[in-house]
Amino acid sequence: PLVAAASVAMFIGSLVAIPWILVRLPADYFDTRVERHWMRDHHPILRAAGLVVKNVAGLIFLAAGIAMLVLPGQGVLTILIGLSLVDFPGKRRLEAQLVGQPAVLRGINAVRARFGKPPLVLAPESHG
């Protein structure tokens, strides 16, 4: 019963969280030519605390996404959101390669279009 409840919670959570996150991203978020500066203008302690929270949330999304590969839910998109939250070397390039996959890019841009948001802009080497 616990696994079933967790599966239902992850499925419902992904149906709400994934579109909410995808439509709030700037169109150039995954463009490796554009620098990202998360919380750059905040106090160093607040920035450090924010980075810890962001990375923990990313690990939770990653774990949930991996589980959704065999359970109901949007596993690939959830993994992508988790990756975008976790900091590690080479992250931007990996994100761009994943988002640059035609099926993934079409899916994300379809969600963005439903909410009147422009499609994602990617560097030419990120997609075919």
Image (spheres, rainbow, N blue to C red):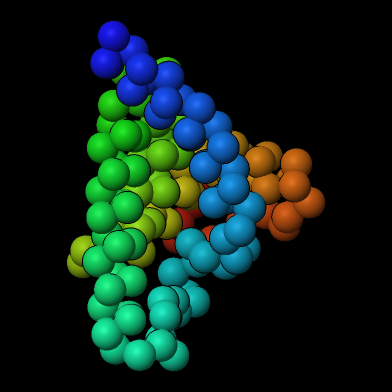
Count all numbered tags in the image, as a single digit.
0
Rendered image quadrant of residue 64: top left
**Residue furthest right as drawn:** 116
- Name the residue nearer the viewer: 128 or 45: 45
Percent position of residue 40, x then y: 41, 86
Q: What residue is drawn where x is 33% and y is 62%? A: 54
**Residue furthest top as drawn:** 1
Looking at the image, can residue 48 be seen? yes
| For residue 126, above or below residue 89 | above
Percent position of residue 48, x then y: 26, 78
Q: What residue is drawn where x is 21% and y is 64%? A: 88
Looking at the image, can residue 103 be seen? no
Q: What residue is drawn where x is 75% and y is 41%? A: 114
Q: What residue is drawn where x is 36% and y is 17%? A: 5
| For residue 85, above or below residue 113 | below
- Name the residue nearer the viewer: 76 or 9: 9
- Name the residue nearer the viewer: 93 or 71: 71
| For residue 48, above or below residue 12 | below
